Amino acid sequence: MSIFDDELPTAKKGNPPQVGEDLSRHSEEELSERIQQLRAEIEKTESELQKRSKIRSDADAVFKI
């Protein structure tokens, strides 16, 4: 076991970010990539939420008396 931080494993490329993971071992580049991945996931989630909201609104309009 090494005492040098540069020999510690870092995040592997292509792995999705995990909520709550230890970020201290990530490089600046990896942290920037993580932010981009999380922003893309937020946009995807917001888009799905908007779709569902529209479906609910349409359904409410159909069944409104």
Image: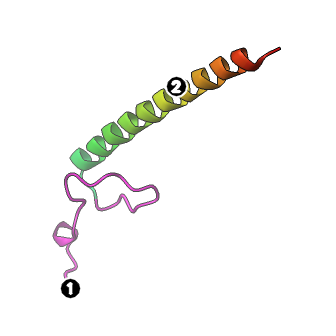
Where disc 2 sits, the SS reads helix
Q: Is residue 8 magenta?
A: yes
Give the residue number, with chain letter if any, for mark 1: 1
The front one of 62 and 32 is: 62
The front one of 8 and 42 is: 42
Mainly helix, strand or loop, the magenta region? loop
Magenta extent: 1-25
Q: Please give the name of the residue rendered at 21% of the width and 59% of the height, measured from the top-left corner.
A: 12
Give the residue number, with chain letter if any, for mark 2: 51
Q: Please give the name of the residue rendered at 52% of the width and 25% of the height, measured from the top-left corner.
A: 51
Q: Is residue 50 magenta?
A: no
Where disc 1 sits, the SS reads loop
The front one of 48 and 33 is: 48
Residue at the outermost left position: 7
Q: Please give the name of the residue rendered at 71% of the width and 15% of the height, measured from the top-left corner.
A: 61
13 above or below 57?
Answer: below
**What residue type is disc 1 on?**
Met
- Which mark's residue is nearer the viewer, 1 or 2? 2
Residue 29 percent location from the top left of the image: 22, 45
